[in-house]
Amino acid sequence: MEPAEDFLLKLENKIKAKAFRTIELLKEFGPELREPFSKKIAGFNGLFELRIKQGSNICRFFYFFEREKIIIITSGFIKKDQKTNRDQLDKAKKLMNQYKGEAT
């Protein structure tokens, strides 16, 4: 989705390269990709986070699966705290629901 692509293209080169490699892993392994690269978001049915760390920089992308084979990456953000920002989770859920044509 556009928000994820915009975020990805604005990342610094080193973390951007690592993000592209991690996305390739997601494409290769799909739902079988697990930690430390991917984690299911508790309380958000069907939503996952793609986890990227480069040095002290940490970023996350939210994604879900469409028909178990198509990966839809909704959005991304730079992680600054231990806990994932609730606003970012709500944004990802809203984008997922919009994609699926569901009411938010």
Image (cartoon, rainbow, N blue to C red):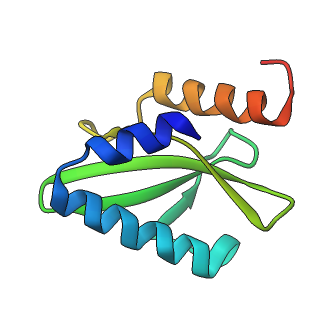
Residue appearing at x 75%, y 27% in the figure? 98
66 in relation to 89, above or below? below
Which quadrant is home to the N terminus? Answer: top right
For image coordinates 51% across by 64% down, the residue present is 38
Please state if 46 lies on the left or on the right of 48 as rendered: right
Q: Is the C terminus in the top left, top right, bottom left or bottom right quadrant?
A: top right
Task: Judge whether residue 36 can be spotted in this image.
Answer: no
Closest to the observer, 7 or 64: 7
Quick one: 80 or 100, which is closer to the camera? 100
Q: Position of residue 84 (x, y in %)?
A: 41, 37
Q: Does 64 sit left or right of 101 as displayed? A: left
For image coordinates 41% across by 29% down, the residue present is 85
Residue plotted at (87% across, 60% down): 67
Residue 37 lies in quadrant:
bottom left
Residue placed furthest toward the bottom: 28
Q: How many marks?
A: 0
